[in-house]
Image (cartoon, rainbow, N blue to C red):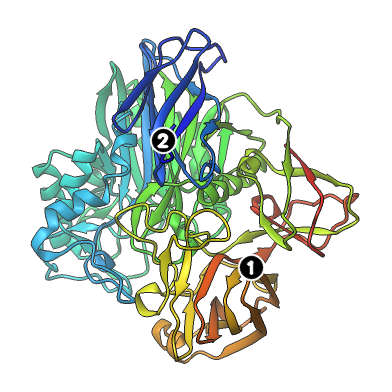
Amino acid sequence: MAKNQITLYGKVFNEHASPIHNAKIVVGEITTFSSKLGEFKIKVPKQAIYSLDISAKEFYEMRFSYSLFELNASNTKSVKLDDFFLVEKKAGRVLMAFGGDVMMGRRYAKPYFNNPTLIKEQTVEEDTKEIVQYMAPYLKKADFAAVNLETQIADKTPVQRAPKSVTFYSPPETVNALKIAGVDYVTLGNNHTYDYLDSGLKSTIEALKKYNLPYSGAGQNDQEALKAHRTLINGNAFGMLGFVGWEGSANPSQTADSHKGGAAYGSLKNIVASVKREVADNRITVAQYHGSLEYEDEPTMMTETRLKAAIDAGADLAIAHHPHVTQGFEVYNGKLIAYSMGNFIFDQFFYATNHSFLLYVWMDGEEFYRAEVVPVYLQGYVPTPATGEHRSRILARLNDLTSKRNTHFSRNAGHGVILPNKVQADFDHISLFSNGKYITPLPKNAFEGQIRKLTSSSSNRYRLGVNLINNSDFETHTAFYSHDRGFNLDQSDFYITNENAFSGEFSLKRDSKDANSTLAMTNFTRVYRAGNPASVSAMIKGKGKVNIYWQGRKTRDKMFDALKNGNKHLIESVVLTGNWQEIVSEFNTPRVGYRSIRILLEFESTDEIYIDDLALIEWRTPWLNWLQQANFHNGAGQSTFIGFETPLISNVELMLE
């Protein structure tokens, strides 16, 4: 076998675990087929990301993506993949795909932090299509795809502007790009659909009509706004409703009334009446709702009440958004509720908002049959298939938040699965060896469930935590055309290299310099738990000294002023030995007075410096011994990292539920 090739092998089953014969597996331009036992092998060139398109006659085609790093294939000729499951096509069955918040304005055209411009004035049409390129293959596999268009559409800044602090608009080519990518409908029921009042709403609706992209959730008056988009999908009559959960304090408000335009107001009365209208017309009814609080783990009780009222009134599916982070699912009276989709295409640079998902939902008429979560990572504002640590973090969070609602979250290869009647958890065992380190990521399969038990021959204590930084192993930093923006590489002496790495193939490098230099998180992490213990963890190779700091943005600070002038708090200074060494610096996140934090590493060295596996771990459990098991409060169930009191040199067995 050529050195630059590997063999991927696995099995393809139907959703009842029977093997599928003659399933077609495509990776790039290479194709193979499964045997009678559902087995396949495919030899492919080594590359950063592998996307497998798997199809079979009378089954829905699916795409699954992996990174070379997570497959541990850098020095391996053959890799066993997870089992793949396809869903059978049948009369009346519909596959719908849902994405979260979408916009292509603001920092896409005018980026912060010296980052590259993604939408340039001279190439808007090409640039907007590029932004959706990685998600288009996923969207097109559905019979019907929908997103929340959280922006007005205009070719220039509209004349009118709502009296609010944050407004934005996106170019008309945004609509065309979504349409070409496979989006069939957008909801406008959100708090940015009236940012530029009637002029912006008019240009938005004109653009949607020009590109023949249907919508609901807004209109020139409340009667128009509360109308459903009615459509036929595989012979089934559907009604698509969109609502925003609050009127807004500005004058004029963001919601439509009898005399003005705006978004459809999702009051309890309006939701119930609108759903009952569609049900009375014998339509399968999908209600999308924009509400709850930004960056929170759980929906507000108002959101939960309204979504469940929609189901009680006859809605067959409820989809929510607005928090910009993902929240859990619930099967309520046999119907699926998704409490927050997170971002799908958005320009936020808060680290937590980059983790999202595409939701597949299969419906048999009005009956919820199955859902699958396709993890998505917004790399440099561009949605990409989430792999490795990104996928683990997304699925661990969703599993934790979903299991609290007596709804079981299982797995199909790299996807999460929700079934209407399955609440009994499965168990699995995974071995972990920490390679003599204090802190290590949990195995990639650990997102299958919460850790219920750990066993080891060591008396060493452990704790569980979450990495608040993205792409910190640097393996997929350059895997897509839009590079990650989580570190200040555009303003520092550091760059991605494959010359020397502690794990995988890539690390950060700084060449020999006479002056000192700083590697920092580009921006503050908005989402963190105040007063939690935390660790800055990294593998560093080089000589000299590194000073490790945390810096905060106080409650009333302006962001750029805080980045430039905010006090830096020294955590620790470490002498570098010249060999790869693990750095673990402990501190407590500020309890009060700060809205966000970041970390900085200042190097005093004239040597070449390499950095790998840089993480900011927020601990979600106290120290535990092997006889003590974690109580999963304070987000401990979302953990993707494990820390040891002393470097572990023996195996750990993890039991997952």
> What amino acid does circle 2 point to?
Ala
- Residue that carries the numbered disc 2 in the rendered image: 2
Q: Secondary structure at mark 1?
A: loop
Report the residue at 56% width, 51% height from top.
393
- Residue that carries the numbered disc 1 in the rendered image: 529
What's the mark number on residue 198?
Answer: none
Check the image and report above or below for 178 versus 353.
above
Front-lying residue, 631 or 516: 516
Q: In this orientation, does residue 557 appear?
A: no
Front-lying residue, 261 or 75: 75
In the displayed structure image, the side of residue 114 where residue 487 appears, left or right: right
Say which quarter of the image contains residue 399: top right
Q: In this orientation, does residue 359 appear?
A: yes
Residue 551 image point, x, y percent? 55, 83
User: Which circle, 2 or 1, is nearer the viewer?
Assistant: 2
**Which quarter of the image is occupied by the C terminus?**
top right
Report the residue at 23% width, 62% height from top.
118
Q: Earlier in the sequence, mark 2 or mark 1?
A: 2
